[in-house]
Image (cartoon, helix red, strand yellow):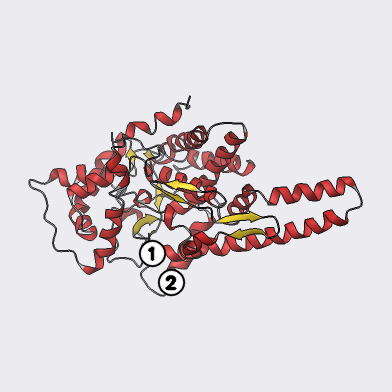
């Protein structure tokens, strides 16, 4: 818990000094497009996490085996009890989650996983795998200095499993996602229901986004950040538990066997390595697909920027008004679960900033091969939540009310 409060203190200090120093990594921009489609880097991102998780599992098993042996030969009751407590600690899913967080989930203002992804993408043989835009070319440039605290940096964009997203979303997934996980476990151990555990975790994230990680430094309430946090909670839980994603259940990645320690669940073999994160990555991670809520000082400039980019963005993603309306409805929840979405007031979308400015609906040309995978990914996320008629008001307001 100590790391969290240190980060929050540092973030508070950074927010207080933003008028003098630009902070890199606060904002992400997927309305500003790369000159060409990026190589899909999702499998590589999963491999990075896998390569840090696998040694943790091996080290835990070796330590469990060592403690079992030392417990057997211990000649004192305190010594034996200590060894048995260590075995219990490492046999708990909380241990694996914490070790993974320590390995790649720490860092400020950039989390270690973000730096690893950027480094791998910059040297990836199938280029381009990463797109970096300057602050002056981003959608924020027209509003950036309208208030003292709005000096921000723009993180790179990568394409993961068909979704264009900022590298910061993986930092949210593995850092704030772990904070959600801690809150979930704390509530669970206090006897709360599963629903209450999820609500408590999300409520903490909403408080951060309304404050030190969102509105205070940048005037932004990022729905994509909150969705990434929530996906991270699901990922950490899924290390050793089944989790629901929409209408499907993802079995636990690891199971504990008394005679073998932690072993990879054979029913998840398709996710080993390059598929590790795939179930948790969705259009929710994109600041264009799942746009943010901006304060009044920023909205005008950002709306103009999105309007200006609209035609190129629609062509790049080969999309339409109807498809974007369906997708935006789907963003109101994380596959049917509230994650803190802001609702649509003061949110700049491709629909209200571009399609609504057209005299007639735009006609998109025949799908080019280069955008086919992007179109397929977008259609995958049009379904699910939209069919269930999710109401955005069930998010930020509802998670602040405890389930009865």
The residue that label 2 is drawn on is 124
Q: Quadrant of residue 131?
A: bottom left
* Closest to the observer, 268 or 12: 268
Q: Residue at horizontal 36%, vertical 32%?
A: 394
Q: Which residue is mark 1?
A: 130
Q: Are marks 1 and 2 in contact (CB under 8 Å)?
A: yes
Disc 2 element: loop
Horizontal side of residue 26 vs 366, given as left or right:
right
Classify 10 Å Cα crowding around label 1: few (below 14), some (14-19), many (20 and above): many
State the image coordinates of residue 212 (x, y, percent, origin top left): 48, 38
Q: Where's residue 50, x and y in %? A: 54, 62
Residue 254 has which mark?
none
Circle 1 sits in a helix, a strand or a loop, which is it? loop
Q: Quadrant of the N terminus?
A: top right
- Identify the residue at horizontal 81%, vertical 59% (top origin): 69
Q: Is residue 18 above or below residue 131?
A: above
Residue extending farthest top? 404
């Amino acid at each position: 818990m100590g790391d969290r409060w240190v980060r929050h203190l540092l973030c508070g200090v950074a927010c207080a000094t933003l008028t003098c120093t630009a902070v890199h990594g606060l904002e992400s921009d997927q309305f500003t497009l790369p000159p060409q489609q990026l190589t899909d880097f999702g499998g590589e991102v999963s491999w990075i996490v896998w390569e840090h998780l696998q040694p943790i599992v091996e080290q835990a098993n070796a330590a469990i085996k060592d403690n079992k042996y030392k417990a057997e030969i211990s000649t004192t009751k305190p010594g034996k009890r200590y060894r048995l407590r260590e075995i219990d600690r490492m046999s708990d899913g909380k241990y694996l989650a914490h070790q993974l967080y320590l390995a790649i989930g720490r860092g400020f203002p950039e989390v270690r996983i973000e730096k690893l992804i950027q480094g791998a993408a910059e040297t990836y043989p199938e280029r381009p795998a990463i797109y970096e835009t300057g602050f002056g070319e981003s959608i924020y440039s027209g509003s950036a200095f309208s208030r003292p605290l709005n000096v921000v940096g723009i993180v790179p964009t990568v394409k993961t499993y068909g979704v264009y997203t900022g590298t910061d979303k993986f930092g949210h997934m593995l850092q704030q996602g772990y904070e959600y996980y801690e809150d979930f476990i704390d509530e669970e151990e206090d006897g709360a229901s599963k629903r209450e555990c999820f609500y408590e975790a999300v409520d903490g994230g909403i408080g951060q986004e309304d404050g030190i990680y969102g509105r205070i430094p940048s005037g932004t309430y990022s729905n994509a950040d909150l969705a990434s946090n929530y996906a991270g909670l699901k990922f950490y839980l899924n290390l050793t538990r089944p989790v629901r994603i929409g209408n499907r259940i993802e079995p636990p990645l690891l199971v504990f066997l008394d005679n073998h320690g932690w072993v990879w669940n054979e029913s998840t073999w398709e996710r080993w390595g390059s598929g590790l994160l795939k179930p948790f990555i969705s259009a929710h991670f994109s600041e264009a697909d799942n746009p943010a809520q901006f304060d009044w000082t920023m909205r005008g400039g950002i709306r103009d920027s999105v309007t200006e980019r609209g035609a190129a963005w629609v062509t790049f993603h080969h999309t339409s008004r109807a498809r974007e309306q369906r997708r935006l409805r789907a963003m109101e929840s994380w596959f049917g679960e509230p994650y803190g979405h802001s609702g649509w007031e003061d949110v700049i979308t491709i629909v209200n900033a571009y399609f609504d400015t057209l005299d007639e609906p735009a006609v998109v040309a025949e799908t080019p091969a280069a955008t086919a995978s992007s179109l397929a990914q977008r259609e995958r996320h049009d379904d699910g939540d939209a069919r269930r008629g999710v109401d955005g008001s069930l998010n930020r307001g509802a998670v602040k009310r405890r389930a009865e």
